[in-house]
Image: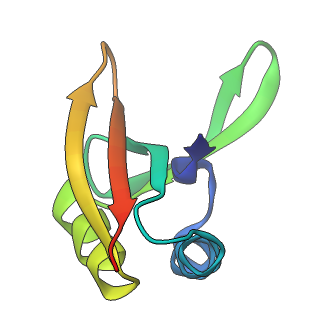
């Protein structure tokens, strides 16, 4: 599982591209995303600074498709976290 929303926007696409290249056809990719487009750089989690950057779900869907992944299901957890399951095509 990948916490993609902890990556800055400029690093997000690069990470998705690398993950997609490593996956074989039919492989699943489970990741978390935020509920909307934006970022927070000064949030504390257990006393440690933590950043959150996310695209809206449509933005993640477009990125996945560009690298041969299909979004299969999403689950919105309490708060701002969305769990997304995608699969490599081919």
Q: Is residue 89 above or below residue 37?
A: below
Q: Residue 23 sits in which quadrant?
A: bottom right
Q: Residue at x 33, y 18 (%)?
A: 79
Q: Residue at x 61, y 49 (%)?
A: 6
**Which picture quadrant has residue 7?**
bottom right
Residue in the foreground of this view, choosing between 51 and 90: 90
Which of the 4 image quadrants contains residue 61? bottom left
Give the number of callouts: 0
Q: Which residue is nearer to you in this view: 53 or 76?
A: 76
Where residue 15 appears, as percent x and y from the top left, is 62, 72
* Residue in view at x 24 percent, y 76 percent: 62
Q: Is residue 41 visible?
A: no
Residue 57 in percent (x, y) is at 22, 55
Q: Quadrant of the N terminus?
A: top right
Q: Taking 29 as reference, is 89 above or below it?
A: below
Residue 26 vs residue 23: left or right?
A: left
Vertical position of residue 46 compared to residue 16: above or below: above
Residue 28, given in percent of the width and then of the height, sits at 45, 51
Nearer-the-camera pick, 27 or 18:
27
Give the image location of residue 66, x and y in percent: 32, 87
Say which residue appears at 53% left-offset and 72% top-offset: 16
């Amino acid at each position: 599982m990948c916490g993609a929303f902890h990556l800055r926007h400029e690093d997000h696409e690069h990470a998705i591209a690398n993950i997609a290249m490593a996956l074989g056809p039919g492989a699943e990719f489970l990741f978390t995303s935020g509920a909307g487009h934006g970022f927070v750089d000064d949030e504390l989690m257990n006393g440690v600074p933590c950043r959150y950057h996310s695209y809206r779900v449509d933005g993640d869907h477009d990125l996945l498709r560009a690298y041969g992944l299909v979004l299969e299901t999403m689950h919105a957890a309490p708060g701002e976290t969305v769990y997304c399951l995608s699969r490599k095509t081919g």
